[in-house]
Image: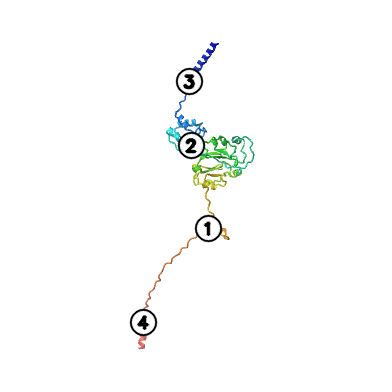
Amino acid sequence: MSTTIIFTVVSLSLLGLVLAVVLYLVAQKFKVEEDPRIDEIEPLMPGANCGGCGQAGCRAFAEACVKAPNLDNLFCPVGGNPVMKLVAEKLGIQIAEKAPMVAVVRCSGTCENRPKTNIYDGVASCAVMNSLYTGDTGCKYGCLGQGDCTKVCSFGAIHINPQTGLPEVDENKCTACGACVKACPRMIIELRNKGIKSRRVYVSCVNKDKGGVAKKACAAACIGCMKCAKVCPFEAITVKDNLSYIDYNKCRLCRKCVEACPTGAILAVNFPPKPAKPAEPQPAAGTPAAETQSVKTQVVEAPVVETPTAQTPAVEAPVAETPAAGTESVNNQENQRAI
């Protein structure tokens, strides 16, 4: 009995030892050499593993940085420019700073602007709702309001406003990881430049229907009238498929498009209020409006006074008259007779 037990233990031990040697040899044969700099760069990462950089995680991003010839196409949105500067210093690479970005919800279809036409009583998911039908309002492009974007945000930077039914982004918490952009089935959320002093101008609408149809579905919809594109002095606005879009790389925040938009679809965020225009003088009582307008627009020119030139009258000298020869002889004859 004891011999059997000892034989079993020895056999299993030898079998385990042989298999361990085989596994070691196989591991050494097929092992992958890894750059030691990956272990140096990984601690520099924020550790969010959000995937906003386009990689599977922070270690995968560190590996991509080591293998890439430059960092032009690699950026960690959570760590931002400070983290990328540390990575560049570790790798001995020069890198240019990028403008900070923030998630923007391009929809103004509040409960007032976009009334509901039916009641959705299904799974609270934008993806499910979008796959079933066009939504509970007349706009088939607008926000569904089921909060898929809020569920995927790892930083608590987005929430649904119960009064408007639309998601709102806290720009102080947003890291521009892009998770909400990927989660939105209607591509309403976009990453845009945060802007100087967090000031931005963008079209808060994605409706591509014609003007009349879009305006009927939502009071704040873009109707593709092209007024904004005509007043933009920097050619930052394009109109395609009945929808305006502002290129944030060309926009200079002049806000002329905001004033020109007839539906209020273009929003200007974090701008100070413009000073009020001075009130125009009221016409006096009894003065017709047309006459007052003509008086205001009439330009009164001062009359030109002409100074007369002093002219001296020419004085003509008297001309002495010479008597004719016949008259002188007659006078001599009369004088002799008198004598």
- Sequence-first disc among 4 and 3: 3
Three-letter amino acid code at disc 1? Lys
Q: Nearer the viewer, mark 1 or mark 2?
A: 2
Three-letter amino acid code at disc 4? Glu
The kind of secondary structure element at disc 4 is: helix
Q: Quadrant of the N terminus?
A: top right
Q: Nearer the viewer, mark 4 or mark 3?
A: 3
User: Dot 2: within a 10 Å radius of its alpha carbon, few (fewer than 14), some, or many (20 or more) residues?
Assistant: some
What is the number of the mark on residue 24?
A: 3
The kind of secondary structure element at disc 2 is: helix
- Tell me if label 4 and label 3 are in contact, CB under 8 Å: no
Three-letter amino acid code at disc 3? Tyr
Q: Is residue 96 above or below residue 6?
A: below
Place of residue 253 in the rendered image (x, y in percent of width and height, measured from the top left): 50, 45
Place of residue 311 in the rendered image (x, y in percent of width and height, measured from the top left): 41, 69
Which residue was labeled with disc 2? 80
Q: Depth check: 15 or 254 in front? A: 15
The quadrant where residue 282 appears: bottom right
Q: Residue furthest front?
A: 2
- Rounded to the nearest angstrom, the CA distance separating label 2 from label 3 is 42 Å
Q: Is residue 33 above or below residue 187?
A: above
Q: Depth check: 174 or 193 in front? A: 174
Which residue was labeled with disc 1? 296
Q: Tell me if 224 is positioned left or right of 307 in this view.
A: right
Q: Quadrant of the C terminus?
A: bottom left
